[in-house]
Amino acid sequence: MDSIKQKILIIDDSPETIQMMVEILKTSYSIIVATHGEKALQLAVKSPVPDLILLDIMMPDMDGYEVCRRLKANGNTQDIPVIFVTALGEVTDETKGFELGAADYIIKPISPAIVQARVKSHLMIRGLTRSLQFVNNELINLNLFLEEKVQQRTKELRYAVYFNSLTGLPSRVSLLKDLDQACYTLAQPPEQGLALLLLDCTRFSLINNSLGHGIGDKVLIAMAERFRNCLQSGESVYHLGEDDFGFLMRGIREETDVTSFANRILHTFAVSFQVESFEIFITARIGIVIGGAGYSQAVDIIRDGDTALQKAKADRTTGYYLFQGSLHDAALKRLRLENDLVIALKREEFLLHYQPIIDFKDNRIDAFEALVRWQNPQRGMVPPMEFISCLEETGLIVSVGMFIFRQACIQLREWQAVFKKELSMSVNLAPRQLSHPGLLADIDRILEETGIDPKDLKLEVTESGLLETGTHTVDILSALRLRGIQISIDDFGTGYSSLSYLNLLPVDILKIDRAFVKDIGPQGEHSEIAQAIVSVGQALGKKIVAEGLETAEQVAHLKQLGCNFGQGYYFSRPLDAKKATELLAVGQIPKA
Ligand code: C2E
Ligand code: MG
Ligand code: MG
């Protein structure tokens, strides 16, 4: 502003010089004067600080250089331009002044034009520097301000997308995101049960239309609060828009888990809503869909949930409707089985039964086949056909398989120590185990742990399993054989493997599937396939085991065909460890 003059401090011990300077500058500037250093330093810090200082060098108690040094050392005065005013010849050390931070020199005797010109230009430089600094600071501040605003706005937008602004509950977008995440988890074994419940209030628009949206909103807020309070662990609630709400329930095991959750939600409407002076009764319907591995994306689950909701609205009896997919019951049953199997592994509910394999040469027990059983407190003794495929599909077979392998080795070592050294053990290996990268390392570790000689072990791989797993299998089988373990093709004849392929496989034993044994009659009728398998096996130099021998005729016939070993109920059913030990103690199968 023009009315406020810029302030100049003149420091000089000579009254004449001061007077001259004042004369030259007083019309354009406001002038203050100090005749010695101490006074000057006091005046210099007084607000508003001077815009420029004219400083004499030669002064009695504190010279100009010292005054300048102190001005520059003080944060309040360091930016003020200092011009030394000095008599000609006094400039002994020009650089000293500049080093101390001086802006310029004016030589006495002073010329008014020079003083005015220098003062003017330095004030201009100072003015410009100040405005630049100001602009710079303003820009920094503006930038900070904008950044804060952007962050705040992003946060608000995120919130608006993921949460309902009225109730603060997670929104439809959140539900879709969580469902997609859940679908991914569903695909990972062990499967986690999940249910989606969609809720719609009956005739909510009536409240809005008759009492106004303000009341309607308050009811929704109260409703959301009740929902929040009724949740237990593994459950979440979403506000999908207007009077639509959604619920997710994770880790379900039974259908009743979900229906009781639905009842709990419906129960929150049992008490009326008191808003202002109104008492409002509301009813709602819920559509339920139970998710399982059958769902790969969120929209499918929501679609079925909507279908169920429509049914629930049409049906006025229960308040909820459970979506009935065609595979629904099977899926639930399967889900329960998977859950139980995970627990079974933890609780060590798996155990082994052993079925003897008889050497036709001397009618003695050559080996035992280890066959897994599941002893479950609720289900009783479960046969493998009911759970092996589930273990396979979930990948649990890898862990359970190694548990079985270890048990079989421990049992064999015990029997070898007590009875005979040449006894061997046959263990079944599932296709999933064969393709598991850790198989060889696991087997080596257990062999080492139990001290079993690999040549006393046989691994049974089903023919169909071999065909499924492909070329990599051959390498694994070869690696097992290199250790001395014998490989047996189980259920041979059912997998349609070509003869040329069979020739390539590194196997030692063929086990004729019992399907080809069971039809053989007393006179040896229907024995063509068994005969063909034995011929092929012999031609390829494999040992042959006949499975499922139930009658004396079957035994006699397969012996006569050239089988080396036999296994079946005729000799013995699979036995628990205690009974199998007793059998070994006798040493011979009575019927053989
Ligand atoms: P598999 O390996 O072919 O085992 C022979 C099955 O035939 C056993 O059934 C056995 O009890 C049954 N069996 C033996 N002799 C006779 C007979 O004379 N007549 C009839 N009708 N059946 C007989 P199990 O124990 O129910 O096992 C069924 C299948 O489950 C096994 O067939 C095998 O594929 C699988 N399995 C059993 N234990 C294991 C295991 O530890 N691991 C794997 N991966 N699979 C296993
Ligand atoms: Mg077997
Ligand atoms: Mg078999």
Image (cartoon, rainbow, N blue to C red):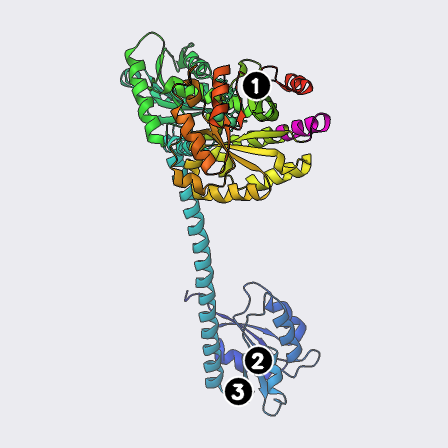
Foreground: 392 or 125?
392
Residue 205 in magenta stretch: no
Main SS category, magenta section: helix
Nearer the observer, disc 1 or disc 2? 1
**Outermost top residue:** 317
Label 1 lies in ligand 1 vicinity (Cβ under 8 Å): yes
| 46, above or below 358, in the image | below
- Find residue 224 and report its image quarter: top left
Circle number at residue 574: 1
Q: Quadrant of residue 95?
A: bottom right
Q: Secondary structure at mark 2?
A: helix
Which residues make up the magenta segment?
A: 408-421
Categorize mark 3 by other alpha carbons within 10 Å: few (<14), some (14-19), many (20+).
some
Choose between 176 and 104: the one closer to the eye. Answer: 176
Q: Quadrant of the N terminus?
A: bottom left
Residue at image location 44% in from the left, 66% down from the top: 131
- Residue 120 visible to an observer of this rendering: yes
